[in-house]
Image (cartoon, rainbow, N blue to C red):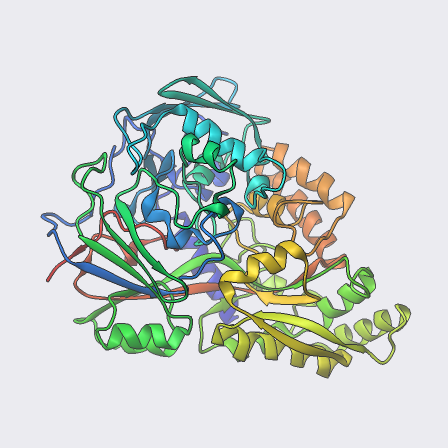
């Protein structure tokens, strides 16, 4: 019942004050999924802090998981480390807790009469950090990188944009994006979504041409149009940025310097804030967060839905995991409740099915927790799991398998051992755990060098699960790390994308979730919330008002000290 109550509260937060633009798919409950696009003319044209009279100057120190394998966001480098360099076409408004979508590089936009095209009118006079003028050619080139990159260049977000048919540079300051069908969530998707792993920065055509669209070749991040300039990167240690004095919005930013400090352990992040060694963390341990909550004169705290799922990705191409019976047995046998208990001091977790429990499309947690695999009473689930393993030729279990995990303590010391213990105790599947620096895990996913990989790689870009399912679950999709393929699911996914009636979409989603439960591509153990904490002098972010997490933007932050 605790989980059910939590789901209701998170769903309410997501719906507060949000309305879909009337031009998209019409009014109704579905509209409450998305922040309201301000359409340029009716809302703010620029990011501004919610408080009056912001102060200038100072350094903001942020602690978190600040590592990358390279500097190419569209090939898997974490956006949170580099988003301050870039802009998108549109973005969510930091001042109102991300409840509205406002202009960024696009001054305004229009939805076509057939509801299948968006025309964006771009800002003039914008320049990249290397002096290159910004134009519609950069937008078109960026979408080429996303949708149709050259051979040898991957695109991890390609299938999030499955709805896009083509992108046209109409003139230097106008770009049109044509869709295959009316898509209610498209503008929110362009805004960068709701999590720290997905973003839509606009790179310059010049730098893309010079690198043949492969920014992994660069020894530093590509120049952007954003409010900060890149100054320094020390791998697994820190990033340093300085204020862009020539930013196209002369009001921003307010701080002079931004430091992103790599601190993988949740507890250490909170300790750094409590001790005054850092100013902000987006996710600390539960205990540290509670300490901050007790001292409201010194600290601010907030719980933010992340739409990020904790996962054990199963490599469907490796034996015996290419047998659906083996995957279904693991899906049934692993106790989500035991995993949550092991993880309870790290961050809160809620039990979603194949979407975050905060999504308006989600079944209530109270109903999910009655289903096979999800329920607390494992008696029938274990019996069926053992029957399936025996039928697959493994009556006594098997192993050792290679279970890969991040070196981050929450993964290496808690999640991976807890999952390995579930496999051993319930099914006699033994494991050897191999640890990899978290920033290098994208290469493991891409190359399939694992049997099972425990991490958080099933992340919703927005509350509507359709982009996430297109990216992670469609046959041969760009983030289908389990190498799973099910023709029935793909057909349902196409129908979900083309359907605009909310009730029909819900029924299609339920059918899709049944397919996923029975032919499990991997094990989804739960969805987390981020425990943000900051020193009280950190202003301009409206963190306590946010409807979800957003790690990468510091345009409006200012320090009241």
Q: Residue at x 47, y 32 (%)?
A: 209
Residue 349 place in picture, x, y as percent: 50, 68
Q: Which image quadrant for residue 238?
A: bottom left
* For residue 186, above or below residue 198: above
Comparing 483 with 436, the one in front is: 436
The answer to which of 363 and 170 lies nearer the viewer is 170
In front of the other: 99 or 506: 99
Q: How many marks?
A: 0
Position of 86 relative to 347 (above/below): above
Foreground residue among 25 and 242: 242
- Could one spot residue 457 in this view of the protein? no
Report whether residue 394 is seen: yes
Answer above or below: position of 277 versus 253. Answer: below
**What is the x, y in percent for residue 386?**
82, 75
Residue 508 is situated, as x and y percent measured from the top left of the image, at 67, 43
Q: Is residue 536 left or right of residue 221?
A: left
| Residue displayed at 30% across by 77% down | 271
- Where, quadrant-wise, is the C terminus in this rendering? bottom left
Q: Position of residue 189 (x, y in %)?
A: 47, 40
Specify the quadrant of the image occupied by residue 560: bottom left
Residue projecting furthest to the bottom: 425
Instruction: Examine the image and state in which quarter residue 226 appears.
Output: top left
Q: Is residue 352 left or right of residue 35?
A: right
| Residue at image coords 42%, 24% | 137
């Amino acid at each position: 019942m605790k989980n059910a109550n939590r789901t209701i509260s998170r769903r309410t937060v997501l719906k507060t004050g949000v309305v879909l633009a009337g031009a998209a798919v019409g009014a109704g409950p579905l509209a409450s999924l998305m922040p309201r696009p301000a359409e340029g003319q009716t809302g703010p044209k620029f990011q501004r802090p919610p408080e009056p009279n912001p102060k200038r100057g100072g350094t903001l120190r942020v602690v978190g998981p600040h590592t990358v394998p390279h500097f190419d966001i569209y090939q898997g480098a974490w956006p949170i480390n580099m988003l301050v360099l870039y802009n998108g076409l549109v973005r969510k408004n930091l001042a109102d807790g991300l409840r509205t979508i406002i202009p960024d590089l696009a001054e305004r936009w229009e939805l076509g009469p057939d509801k299948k095209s968006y025309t964006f009118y771009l800002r003039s006079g914008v320049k990249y950090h290397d002096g290159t003028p910004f134009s519609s050619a950069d937008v078109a080139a960026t979408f080429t990188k996303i949708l149709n990159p050259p051979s040898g260049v991957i695109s991890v977000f390609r299938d999030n944009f499955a709805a896009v048919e083509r992108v046209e540079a109409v003139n230097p300051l106008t770009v049109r994006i044509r869709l295959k069908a009316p898509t209610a969530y498209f503008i929110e998707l362009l805004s960068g979504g709701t999590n720290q792993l997905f973003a839509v920065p606009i790179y310059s055509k010049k730098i893309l041409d010079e690198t043949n669209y492969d920014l992994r070749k660069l020894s530093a991040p590509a120049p952007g149009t954003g409010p900060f300039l890149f100054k320094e990167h020390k791998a697994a240690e820190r990033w340093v940025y300085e204020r862009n004095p020539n930013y196209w919005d002369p009001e921003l930013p307010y701080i002079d310097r931004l430091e992103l400090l790599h601190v993988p352990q949740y507890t250490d992040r909170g300790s750094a804030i409590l001790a005054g060694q850092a100013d902000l963390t987006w996710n600390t341990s539960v205990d540290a967060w509670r300490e901050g909550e007790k001292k409201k004169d010194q600290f601010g705290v907030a719980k933010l839905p992340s739409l990020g799922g904790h996962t054990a990705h199963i490599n469907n191409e490796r034996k015996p995991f290419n047998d659906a019976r083996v995957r279904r047995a693991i899906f049934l046998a692993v106790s989500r409740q035991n995993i949550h208990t092991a993880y309870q001091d790290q961050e809160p977790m809620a039990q979603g099915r194949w979407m975050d429990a905060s999504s308006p499309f989600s079944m209530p947690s109270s109903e999910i927790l009655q289903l096979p695999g999800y329920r607390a009473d494992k008696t029938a689930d274990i019996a069926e799991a053992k029957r399936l393993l025996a039928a697959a030729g493994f009556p006594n279990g098997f192993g050792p398998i290679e279970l890969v995990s991040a070196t981050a303590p929450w993964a290496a010391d808690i999640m991976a051992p807890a999952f390995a213990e579930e496999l051993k105790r319930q099914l006699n599947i033994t494991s050897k755990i191999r640890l990899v620096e978290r920033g290098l895990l994208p290469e493991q996913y891409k190359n399939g060098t694992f049997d099972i990989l425990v991490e958080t790689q099933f992340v919703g870009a927005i509350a509507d699960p359709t982009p996430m399912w297109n990216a992670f679950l469609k046959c041969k999709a760009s983030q289908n790390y389990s190498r799973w393929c099910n023709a029935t699911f793909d057909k349902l996914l196409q129908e979900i994308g083309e359907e605009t009636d909310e009730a029909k979409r819900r029924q299609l989603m339920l059918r899709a979730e049944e397919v996923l439960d029975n032919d499990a591509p991997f094990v989804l153990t739960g969805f987390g919330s981020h425990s943000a904490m900051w020193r009280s002098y950190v202003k301009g972010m409206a963190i306590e008002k946010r409807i979800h997490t957003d790690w990468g933007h510091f345009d409006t932050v200012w320090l009241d000290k």
